């Protein structure tokens, strides 16, 4: 079976490598030549655990990379669209890449085809894509909505062992094509959920909105704990013990970021507005997500006094561990506030130094931030240390080494991962989120 996947980003590349790993012939198509060149050298243009090995294992036998859409889609059982859907100014999803890709596929196909929408798109997009393809081909194109639920940092595992495979289609033959493609991943248990395209489109946004709301909720409780002198870690443990609530996404910290939650929440709110429905909870989750970074900044001002001329070490730049993705990263938002207040930043990250460098340049603060590979080197002469991303290697650090390197004594734990007693033994004071000092 042969398929093509348009878009070689996190989703397209992971999906392509995983499908190829089951024996499917996969052609990856992208407009970004630099990315394709990198892939043809056997390199993956971003960091995702185990992805490079999987790409190498399948390339070039079952995995090809091409910029030629016309020849790539010939003989394909399905063509997946996995291009970006970034936010427009008004919060709505920019569908131009999806619609262009759909139009190009329709123009170039020489027979009936199944087109699969893998990108995250608002409800009603399947209908729009159907209208676009109809205009540009005489062949029958069945458009299926198949949202992706993988998470960066554990994407391969998520794709190989999915909780659910949502397939939005009224077309039995198209469903069968996807059923065959995904069956190798769900041998133990049927995890297919077939529904209408509109319902499938909403499942994705509703899932992300609920997870983000959980994060914002526990952060709101952390603010309450801070004000009341309670400990949010005890509150979290007490709450999560209820199996109806559970522990996942109940970690207080600097808030959610990345390329999905913030943009998907805004797009959901916007879609609601267009349909005359107020998605007030999603709106509240967005607003609540602004607070943890500013609360941490205030805590630092209270502890350090004026930040002008202060040196602040920051551990972690990516929006979460195990990725080099810095889009909407809380770490960079905090760095922005600190740099604007006159602090000099010494920042480090195991994987995201290069991606952060580009974004800091775009933010206009690259000159105020030294990017340093070694985390203890980053502490040298610092007045304070912030843990901004909970990379595993930051969770049990060598506190005496930090203490020796730093000028100041304060550590601001933006992810509540440090053992405060161990920090205290080295003469360091640890300020966390929603925990008494
Ligand atoms: P990305 O920005 O990493 O990659 C998108 C790729 O599409 C880029 O390489 C770009 O060059 C390519 N592209 C754009 N237009 C094209 C065209 N006309 N033809 C060929 N290639 C084209 O995006 P991503 O993170 O992989 O996300 C893709 C979609 O999946 C988005 O809608 C996103 O919301 C959704 N999603 C992302 C994740 C995630 O964790 N990143 C998870 C689930 C769903």
Image (cartoon, grey):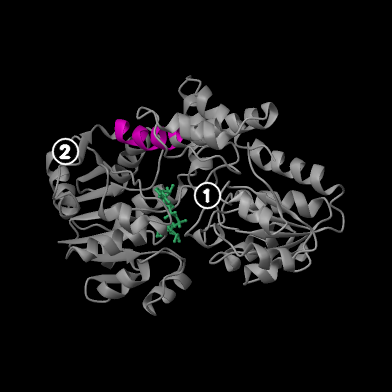
Q: Position of residue 48 (x, y in %)?
A: 42, 63
For disc 1, the neighbor class at 10 Å (few under 14, some 14 to 19, many from 20) is some
| Location of residue 67 (image quadrant) | bottom left
Q: Does 58 appear in magenta? A: no
Q: Position of residue 198 (x, y in %)?
A: 31, 31
Going by the image, does 11 lie left or right of 301?
left
Q: Which residue is mark 2?
A: 171
The answer to whether residue 371 shows anywhere in this view is no
Label 1 secondary element: loop
Q: Are marks 1 and 2 in contact (CB under 8 Å)?
A: no
Q: Which residue is mark 1?
A: 258
Quadrant of the drawing holding the N terminus: bottom left
Magenta range is: 198-210
Q: Position of residue 50 (x, y in %)?
A: 36, 66
The residue nearer to you, when weighing 318 against 103, is 318
Label 2 secondary element: loop
For disc 2, the neighbor class at 10 Å (few under 14, some 14 to 19, many from 20) is few
Q: Position of residue 382 (x, y in %)?
A: 77, 62
Ligand 1 image position (quadrant): bottom left
| Location of residue 343 (image quadrant) | bottom right
């Amino acid at each position: 079976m042969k398929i093509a996947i348009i878009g070689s980003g996190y989703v397209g590349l992971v999906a392509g490598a995983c499908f190829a790993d089951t024996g499917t012939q996969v052609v990856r198509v992208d407009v970004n030549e630099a990315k394709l060149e990198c892939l043809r050298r056997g390199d993956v243009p971003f960091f995702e655990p185990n992805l490079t090995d999987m790409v190498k294992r399948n390339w070039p036998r079952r995995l090809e990379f091409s910029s030629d859409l016309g020849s790539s889609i010939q003989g394909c059982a399905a063509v997946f669209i996995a291009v970006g859907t970034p936010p427009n100014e008004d919060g709505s999803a920019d569908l131009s890449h999806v619609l262009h890709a759909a139009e190009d596929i329709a123009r170039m196909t020489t027979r009936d085809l199944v087109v699969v929408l893998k990108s995250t798109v608002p409800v009603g997009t399947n209908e729009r894509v159907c209208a676009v393809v109809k205009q540009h081909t005489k062949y029958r194109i069945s458009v299926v909505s198949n949202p992706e639920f993988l998470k960066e940092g554990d994407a391969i595992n998520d794709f190989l062992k999915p909780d659910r495979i949502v397939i939005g289609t009224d077309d039995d033959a198209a469903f069968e094509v996807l059923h065959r493609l995904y069956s190798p991943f769900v041998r133990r248990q049927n995890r297919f959920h077939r529904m209408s395209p509109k319902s499938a489109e909403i499942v994705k946004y509703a899932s992300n909105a609920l997870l983000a709301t959980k994060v914002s909720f526990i952060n709101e409780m952390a603010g309450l704990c801070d004000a009341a002198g309670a400990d949010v870690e005890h509150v979290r443990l007490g709450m999560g013990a209820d199996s109806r609530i559970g522990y996942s996404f109940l970690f207080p910290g600097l808030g959610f970021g990345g390329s999905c939650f913030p943009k998907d929440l805004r797009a959901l709110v916007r879609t609601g507005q267009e349909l005359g429905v107020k998605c007030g909870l999603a709106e509240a989750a967005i607003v609540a997500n602004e607070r943890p970074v500013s609360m941490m900044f205030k805590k630092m001002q209270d502890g350090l006094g004026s930040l002008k001329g202060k040196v602040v070490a920051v551990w972690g730049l990516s929006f979460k561990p195990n990725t080099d993705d810095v889009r909407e990263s809380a770490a960079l938002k905090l760095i922005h506030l600190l740099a604007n207040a006159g602090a000099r930043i010494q920042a480090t990250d195991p994987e995201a130094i290069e991606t952060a460098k580009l974004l800091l340049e775009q933010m206009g603060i690259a000159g105020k931030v030294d990017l340093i590979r070694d985390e203890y080197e980053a502490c040298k002469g610092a007045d304070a240390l912030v843990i901004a991303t909970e990379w595993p290697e930051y969770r049990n650090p060598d506190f005496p080494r930090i203490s020796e390197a730093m000028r100041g004594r304060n550590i601001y734990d933006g992810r509540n991962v440090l053992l405060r007693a161990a920090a205290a033994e080295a003469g360091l004071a640890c300020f966390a989120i929603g925990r008494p000092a």
